[in-house]
Image (spheres, rainbow, N blue to C red):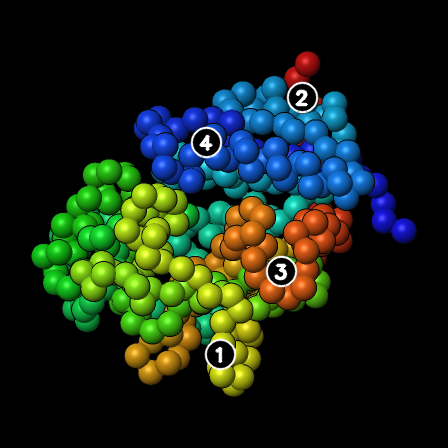
Amino acid sequence: MRRHLHVVLIYNACRGAAPEMPEDNGSTDELRKFVRHLARVIRRLGHRVTLLPLANDLMKFQRRLTRLRPDVVFNQYDDVVHGALYEMRVAALVRMMGFPMTGSSALALGLCRYKYMAISLLQGAGLPVPPDSRMIERIGDVDRHHWKFPAIVHPAQEHAGIGLGRESVVHSARAMRDQVRTILREYRQAALVQRFLPGREFNIGLLGGQRVRVLPFAEVNYTKLPPELPPIMSYAAKWLTNSVEFKKTSVICPSAVEPKLARRISRLAIDAFRAVGGWGYGRVDIRLDENQQPHVLEVNCNPCVEEGVALARSALAAGISYPRMLQMILEAALERPPFDVDVPMLPALR
């Protein structure tokens, strides 16, 4: 018999400093709509749900969470400040307070945001990553390396396509310097430079705690993009509904993949997720090189759980309904990852 839980759903209620565009699906207003829908679905599972926003007052948040005494915290806290690691700190606080939490640990979330650190960890574990992966902290550092083009230049501490655009795939050292300069100036962080891989791109959804289930592959389809636009999941392709990138980029799920390659991709996705300490649910982005060999682009430990897209779309292709997927995420939180311990902390000030 299913246990009825008190679920506290936490999310980021702080608006970003920059004004938001009406066509931006990643806006704060869209986030709040999603959170309310998520709460309704969890209630339909028979659980009691309390919404707990966090903006700027961490002590108030801690006091409220202490009073609520949830059975589990459904962690939907995500950063809006470029390069910030508040989501790591919030996850650490929840676990230090002794409450089970959905998704991955603070350490895993932090690793996924420090992209060069995550790539280095995966490479050290013997997993294939894009060649020539380097962190560039000064424009002059570009000239210290021999590059094979094309290359792709990302902000080193962002996610959700932030900082990826039409100029991100470069074909010369001069263009690379220009893009690194943009990242240093606009995002105030280092750039991650990697060789651009020309093959197929897959989003591999994962569900479960001790036993991880690989969901049907989602393949990003760039074939309708104009040739002058790079085939990448840029911010525009993910969120800006009026952009050419959004309109011309689609996802095929389930994707048809030759069985031997599918087995290799599945094993690679699980190994990458485990290597960074992922738990409960996740997504691993994999792209093929010119020889059809898979490489890990990124591990996303707490990916989007919006209904009908991304992870939920892959789950549905496996016959897992949206409510069932959320229930599986809650169950994995109660299962608790290995080496997870309750760390005593001082009570919140009253």
Check the image and report above or below for 328 versus 231: above
N-terminal of the pair, mark 3 or mark 4, is 4
Observer-nearest residue: 190 or 329?
329
Q: Amino acid at mark 3?
A: Leu
Q: Please tell me whether mark 4 sits on a helix, a strand or a loop.
A: helix
**In the orientation shown, which residue stands out farthest toward the left?**
174
Tag in front: 3 or 4:
3
Q: Position of residue 273 (x, y in %)?
A: 55, 62
**In the orientation shown, which residue stands out farthest toward the right?**
1
Q: Where is mark 1, residue-wise?
A: 257
Check the picture and name the quadrant holding the C terminus: top right
Picture residue at 32% right of the left edge, 43% below the top = 242
**In the orientation shown, which residue stands out farthest toward the bottom?**
260
- The disc at residue 316 is 3
Check the image and report above or below for 265 versus 347: below
Q: Please tell me whether mark 3 sits on a helix, a strand or a loop.
A: helix
N-terminal of the pair, mark 1 or mark 2, is 2
Q: Position of residue 18 (x, y in %)?
A: 32, 28
Q: Where is mark 2, residue-wise?
A: 63
N-terminal of the pair, mark 1 or mark 4, is 4
N-terminal of the pair, mark 2 or mark 3, is 2
Q: Amino acid at mark 1?
A: Val
Q: Where is mark 4, residue-wise?
A: 28
Q: Please tell me whether mark 2 sits on a helix, a strand or a loop.
A: helix
Q: Amino acid at mark 2?
A: Arg
